Image: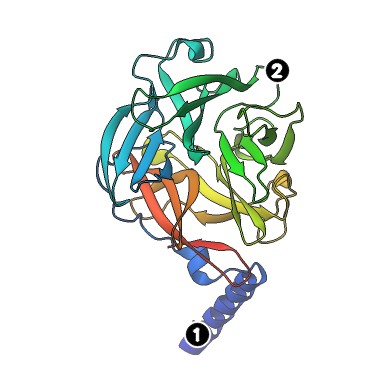
Amino acid sequence: MRPRLRKLLLAGVTGLLAVTASAYGLTRADAATYPNPGVVTGSTFAHDPTIVKKPAGGYLLAYTAPGIGLKTSTDRTRFTDAGKAFPNGTPWADTYTNGDTNLWAPDISYQGGKYLMYYSASTFGSSRSAIFLATSSTGAAGSWTNQGRVIESTTSSGYNAIDPNLTVTPSGEWWLSFGSFWSGIKIVKLNPSTGKRADSTIRGIAERFVNSKSVEAPHIYYRNGYYYLFVAFDLCCKGASSTYRTMVGRSKTITGPYKDRAGTLMTAGGGTEILASHDAVYGPGHPAVFSDGTQDVLVYHYYTASGDARLGINLLSWSSSGWPTVY
């Protein structure tokens, strides 16, 4: 092929890619490159992490582990092991875990002068699951009191009661999103005085129909008039073979409809990818977002080439049209 013809063909392909990216509101950086995790030192293992900023300063992190693992940090960079939320076991969850002490995907927040933690009990691949609530005045290991079951699912429910996330709206309403595979992500209204369900309504806010219907780990974050629904697509928990990736959509109301950047409903499989496997980062997912001063912080886990789970922390920037980019 003559050099001039090759140059013209390459220019045409590049232009087509640029037009396609532009049509979907993407830049080349959005489409092709992702940042590595920010610097995290000390105790760096984490799976399904959640972080809350403590009122007196510093940070408290909870993650999937026997009795739910805890870590603390003074600077959001160096983390130190801080024991277990439930060092003496959780017999109330044994029905759902078949006696395993691992409790999954905690969601930690600080509300009304105390720490709240929603967490799930299940076994891998089963929808016989439950979400529980615990509270603590300090957040320290062994100080957590179980407040009972919030919602459960059975093998015939058609949804899976794991991966909880509490969102408090600007008007003070409490909502719990949750879900994994099956018929996707659900949301229920809570009573702020009890942290338990306010009614019997279960609403669907996201669902997939490919890759084993793999959508899970919802986290809803409110910003500038929009509720942003962050989720994980594809498969977790396979070490460096994990295909987890972090997706987002948004809605003007917390119960939806949520749409991605291209306008596709998340109940129709939509979701805009903001982070996926790259370089030596495998399966970044189970997202959580919190506000830290002027920064919006994305927390997640990923796997190394050797298959170890690690804590990932990055920041989010926002486009003029209000869509997040990880940096």
In this picture, is 13 found above or below 30?
A: below
SS class, disc 1:
helix
Residue mark closest to the camera, 2 vs 1: 2
Residue 308 visible here: no
Residue at point 65% right, 38% down? 175
Cβ atoms under marks 2 and 1 closer than 8 Å: no
Identify which residue, 74 or 319, lies in the foreground: 74
**Quadrant, the C terminus:** bottom left
Local crowd size for mark 2, using a 10 Å CA cut-off: few (<14), some (14–19), many (≥20): few
- Left or right relative to 13: residue 200: right
Residue at point 50% right, 85% down? 7
Identify which residue, 131 or 311, lies in the foreground: 131
Residue assigned mark 1: 7
In this picture, is 102 found above or below 14?
A: above
Residue at point 52% right, 79% down? 10
Residue 70 visible here: yes
SS class, disc 2:
loop
Q: Which mark is residue 156?
A: 2
Q: Amino acid at mark 2?
A: Ser
Q: Amino acid at mark 1?
A: Lys
Give residue 186's quadrant in the image. Answer: top right
The image position of residue 142, as x and y in percent, is 35, 22
In this picture, is 108 found above or below 7?
A: above
How far apart, in angstroms, are the residues tagged by discs 2 and 1?
59 Å
Q: Which mark is residue 321?
A: none
